[in-house]
């Protein structure tokens, strides 16, 4: 049930809409979602087509600039990203000085926040050239930052960007060195990461994108706004769910609890079934369908499914056979099957949300930029429904 109340207070009529379930705060041309029909389109293109027919850089360009790039535009975009992939030496030192065991999302958000200090020639939201420069820097450097944080966490030296490689291959090499390229599954893994980034590229006003818009609405610069988006994404109800799903699967496996008993605990509200449910999708999440197919290509080779993938399949089937979940329209979301894929590639659980962030960055940037050109642009300033004490006086001043 959604609680939506219209309140008449001293400041006029106000709508109380917890979680903004029914409140549109802007008009946008970027992403279309029909949650009942399970439809997701970026700039009009169905997600299913983009997943198989476009690279992540093409999709990033589409989401940010509104059209698919022509060959020259794509080359120019890609060249700029390659040229800007390095981070300043001081920033590398700063990342290296952060706690090695800190959560990568906390470290990434901190590093991105400092970009404004390193690049103060691109912080003015009123200057289109500066916003464009900051866009390129963010897209170019986020994979370098994420890979460096991962290398630090395992006590390994950073690997510099290689300008001969494309965006995804470069990120994988900066993370794992040449081991993945040499492995039997190397190409498949790189393609899978590319597809997963495409599937994450935008999702209209989800919690992190709404945060980027809210922060940007104060005319804060794009680095500060994206750093805020990273923080919003980190929570387990949002992007942090991909890590939480894997931990849930490991917990089920390690504890030996049956799936039926585990679901009983969920139904008793002791915990949530992570990777299930969505504010907008009340039928199925189209991204989840694509990711499940990808997971079976990678993890169900020779009909010998990976142990945690097999467990996830059983958990999904049991939940979808249970009226508790179907009556509440709870289906697997984007996070349910991503973790098992990332895990098999060698990413530790706490890096999963960082991968989500690399994918979502084009969306954050696109919304920040769209907002700057919105004729209805105003600082975000919701109202509240005050339920506190009425006027009181300090003792002695009554
Ligand atoms: N497990 C068990 N019950 C659930 C779940 C779940 N994952 N999600 C919702 N419910 C139940 C609620 O208990 C509630 O039941 P009730 O009406 O009997 O009280 C009902 O379904 C509606 O739930 P709400 O919390 O009102 O739904 P809301 O839209 O606010 O929450 C959310 C959406 C946060 C995604 C929720 O489904 C959830 O916590 N899922 C698990 C975490 C997760 O996977 N998050 C990733 C979402 S996708 C993304 O952000 C990238």
Image (cartoon, rainbow, N blue to C red):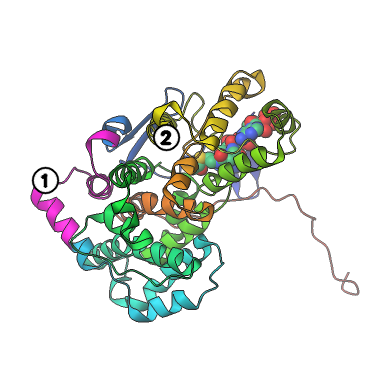
Looking at the rendering, the stretch of residues picked out in magenta corresponds to 51-79
Residue, x 44% and y 78% (percent of image)? 94
Residue 56 magenta-highlighted: yes
Decide if residue 3 is in sight here. no
On screen, residue 212 above or below 313: below
Q: Viewer-proximal residue, 347 or 46? A: 347
Mark 1 Cα within 10 Å, few/some/many (few <14, many 20+)?
few
Q: Mark 2 points at which residue?
A: 295
Mark 2 Cα within 10 Å, few/some/many (few <14, many 20+)?
many
Q: In which quarter of the image is the N terminus?
A: top right
Image coordinates of residue 226 in percent, x first then y, are 41, 60
Question: Toward which corner of the image does residue 128 lie, by quadrant?
Answer: bottom left
Q: Do the residues labelled 1 and 2 touch (CB within 8 Å)?
A: no
Q: Viewer-proximal residue, 135 or 343? A: 343
Residue, x 39% and y 63% (percent of image)? 147
Image coordinates of residue 47 in percent, x first then y, are 32, 33
Question: Toward which corner of the image does residue 59 lie, by quadrant?
Answer: top left
Q: How far apart are marks 1 and 2 (CA)?
A: 31 Å
Q: Viewer-proximal residue, 273 or 372? A: 273
Q: For the stretch drawn in magenta, what is the main secondary structure?
A: helix
**Which numbered disc flags the more N-terminal residue, 1 or 2?**
1
Image coordinates of residue 290 in percent, x first then y, are 38, 31
Residue, x 47% and y 44% (percent of image)? 206
Image coordinates of residue 257 in percent, x first then y, are 72, 34
Q: Mark 1 points at which residue?
A: 70
Q: What element carries label 2?
A: helix
Give the mark toward the camera: 1 or 2: 2
């Amino acid at each position: 049930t959604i609680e939506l109340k219209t309140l008449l207070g001293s400041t006029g009529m106000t709508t109380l809409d917890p979680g903004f379930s029914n409140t549109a705060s802007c008009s946008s041309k970027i992403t279309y979602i029909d949650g009942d029909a399970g439809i997701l389109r970026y700039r009009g293109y169905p997600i299913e087509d983009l997943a198989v027919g476009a690279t992540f850089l093409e999709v990033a360009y589409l989401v940010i600039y509104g059209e698919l790039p022509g060959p020259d535009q794509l080359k120019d975009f890609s060249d700029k990203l390659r040229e800007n992939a390095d981070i300043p030496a001081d920033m590398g030192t700063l990342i290296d000085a952060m706690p090695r065991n800190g959560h990568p999302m906390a470290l990434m958000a901190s590093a991105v926040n400092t970009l404004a200090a390193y690049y103060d020639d691109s912080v003015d939201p009123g200057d289109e050239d500066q916003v464009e420069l900051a866009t390129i820097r963010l897209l170019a450097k986020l994979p370098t930052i994420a890979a460096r944080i991962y290398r630090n966490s395992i006590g390994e030296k950073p690997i510099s960007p290689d300008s001969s490689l494309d965006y995804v291959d470069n990120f994988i090499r900066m993370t794992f060195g040449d081991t993945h390229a040499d492995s039997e599954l190397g190409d498949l893994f790189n393609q899978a990461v590319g597809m997963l980034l495409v599937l994450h590229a935008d999702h209209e006003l989800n919690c992190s994108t709404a945060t980027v818009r809210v922060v940007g609405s104060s005319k804060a610069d794009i680095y500060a706004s994206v750093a805020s988006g990273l923080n919003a994404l980190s929570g387990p109800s949002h992007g942090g769910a991909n890590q939480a799903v894997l931990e849930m699967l490991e917990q089920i496996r390690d504890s030996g609890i049956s799936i039926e008993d585990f679901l009983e605990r969920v139904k008793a509200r002791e915990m949530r079934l992570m990777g299930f449910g969505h504010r907008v999708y009340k039928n199925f999440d189209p991204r989840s369908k694509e990711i499940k197919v990808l997971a079976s290509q990678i993890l169900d080779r020779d009909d010998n499914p990976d142990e945690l993938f097999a467990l996830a399949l059983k958990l999904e089937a049991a939940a979808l056979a249970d009226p508790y979940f179907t009556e509440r329209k709870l289906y697997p979301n984007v996070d349910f099957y991503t973790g098992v894929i990332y895990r098999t590639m060698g990413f530790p659980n706490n890096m999963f949300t960082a991968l989500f962030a690399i994918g979502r960055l084009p969306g954050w940037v696109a919304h920040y930029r769209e907002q700057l050109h919105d004729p209805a642009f105003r600082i975000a300033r919701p109202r509240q429904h005050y339920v506190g004490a009425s006027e009181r006086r300090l003792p002695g001043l009554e």
